Image (cartoon, grey):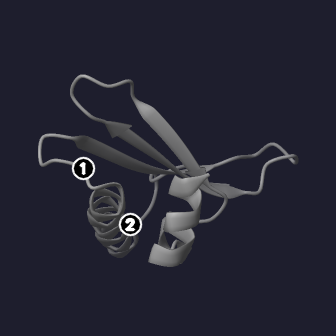
């Protein structure tokens, strides 16, 4: 079993990087964030049976504000703009 991005091939890493870039742009647009806000997007694989398996964790670090964390119970490649809007609203 592989965890995170370790052990993935170049093609898988490219797909993950593309998805993360897309999600960051969508987060910036949906939350109306300034350019100096930092957005981190990571996909986590959980081995715990209680976990959904793969989840996407999004951190929003806006200068002068507390860091906000959002979790989507799906892989980055599955996270649509509509699903992201629901996650960010919740």
Q: Nearer the viewer, residue 72 or 86?
A: 86
The picture places residue 68, in percent across and down from the top left corner, at 45, 35
Mark 2 vs mark 1: which is more N-terminal?
A: 2
Q: Quadrant of the N terminus?
A: bottom right
The kind of secondary structure element at disc 1 is loop
Residue 18 vertical placement versus 89 (above, below): below
Measuring 70% from the left and 47% from the top, which residue is drawn there? Answer: 46
The picture places residue 9, in percent across and down from the top left corner, at 38, 67
* Number of other residues with Cα within 10 Å of mark 2, as a class: few under 14, some 14 to 19, many 20 or more: some
Q: CA distance from mark 2 to mark 1?
A: 23 Å
Measuring 26% from the left and 34% from the top, which residue is drawn there? Answer: 62
Q: Nearer the observer, disc 2 or disc 1?
A: 1
Residue bearing the label numbered 2: 16
* Number of other residues with Cα within 10 Å of mark 1, as a class: few under 14, some 14 to 19, many 20 or more: some
In this picture, residue 77 sits left or right of residue 16? right
In this picture, residue 19 sits left or right of residue 52? left
The picture places residue 41, in percent across and down from the top left corner, at 39, 50
In this picture, residue 77 sits left or right of residue 33? right
Residue 85 - label:
none
How many numbered marks, from 0 up?
2
The picture places residue 5, in percent across and down from the top left corner, at 45, 53
Q: Quadrant of residue 27?
A: bottom left
Toward the left, the furthest residue is: 35
**Residue 3 in sight from this viewpoint:** no
Residue bearing the label numbered 1: 33
């Amino acid at each position: 079993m592989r965890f995170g991005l370790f052990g993935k091939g170049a093609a898988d890493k490219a797909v993950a990087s593309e998805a993360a870039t897309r999600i960051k742009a969508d987060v910036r647009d949906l939350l109306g964030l300034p350019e100096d806000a930092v957005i981190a997007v990571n996909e986590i694989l959980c081995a715990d049976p209680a976990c959904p398996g793969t989840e996407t964790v999004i951190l929003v670090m806006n200068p002068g504000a507390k860091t906000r964390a959002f979790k989507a119970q799906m892989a980055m490649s599955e996270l649509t703009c509509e699903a992201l809007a629901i996650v960010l609203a919740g």
